[in-house]
Image (tube, helix red, strand yellow):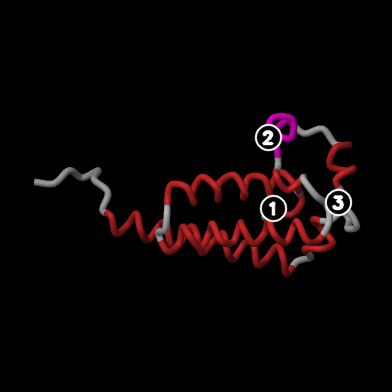
Amino acid sequence: FRCPWELDGRSLALSRILLGFTVLVDLADRIWAGFYEHYTDVGSYPRSMYYGHASYYRQWFPSIYMIAGTFTPLCVLFTVHALSAFMLMVGYKTRLSNIILWYLTASLIVRNETMTH
């Protein structure tokens, strides 16, 4: 007799793969929707505007996407974000990639709240 609340490893692997795929699709959508216009300081939501608005979770959550407002460092961050999602998809260092992916996704949402779906 098996416990009805037991999780099978295959279902956990499928959820891990689907989570990584969902994050990759979300990143592609954010890039396609206007990476330069929404995340750099030249675009419609520069970092100075970010610091001008008070939001509860902005006060307590440091976003790594606020380090730079130029194109190249943001491309590096998006690449690391995509690589951590891919690492989660293929199952390489899943705990580490899950923590990195969580932080980068939360940082991206905090960076520009208007781009959330």
Q: Position of residue 108 (x, y in %)?
A: 68, 50
What residue would you read off at disc 1? 116
Q: Position of residue 63 (x, y in %)?
A: 70, 42
The furthest residue to the left: 1
Mark 1 element type: loop
Q: Position of residue 74 (x, y in %)?
A: 75, 57
**In the rendered structure, are the residues bearing label 2 and label 1 in contact, judged by CB atoms less than 8 Å apart?**
no
Mark 3 element type: loop
> In which quadrant of the rendered image does the C terminus lie?
bottom right
The residue depicted at 37 percent of the width and 61 percent of the height is: 14
Mark 2 element type: loop
Instruction: Write down the quadrant of residue 57 in the picture.
Output: top right
**Would you call the spot at circle 1 few (<14 residues within 10 Å), some (14-19), or many (20 or more)?**
few
Q: Nearer the viewer, residue 42 or 56?
A: 42
**Would you call the spot at circle 3 few (<14 residues within 10 Å), some (14-19), or many (20 or more)?**
some
The residue depicted at 89 percent of the width and 43 percent of the height is: 49
Q: Nearer the viewer, residue 71 or 57?
A: 71
The answer to whether 70 appears left or right of 81 in the picture is right
The answer to whether 55 appears left or right of 53 in the picture is left
- Which of disc 1 and disc 2 is earlier in sequence? 2
Distance between the alpha carbons at the discs numbered 3 and 2: 18 Å
Q: Magenta stretch: give its range.
A: 56-62
Q: Nearer the viewer, mark 2 or mark 1?
A: 2
The furthest residue to the bottom: 32
The numbered disc on residue 45 is 3
- Which of disc 2 and disc 3 is earlier in sequence? 3
Magenta span includes 59: yes
The numbered disc on residue 61 is 2
The residue depicted at 63 percent of the width and 45 percent of the height is: 106
What amino acid does circle 3 point to?
Tyr
What amino acid does circle 1 point to?
Thr
- Which of disc 1 and disc 3 is earlier in sequence? 3
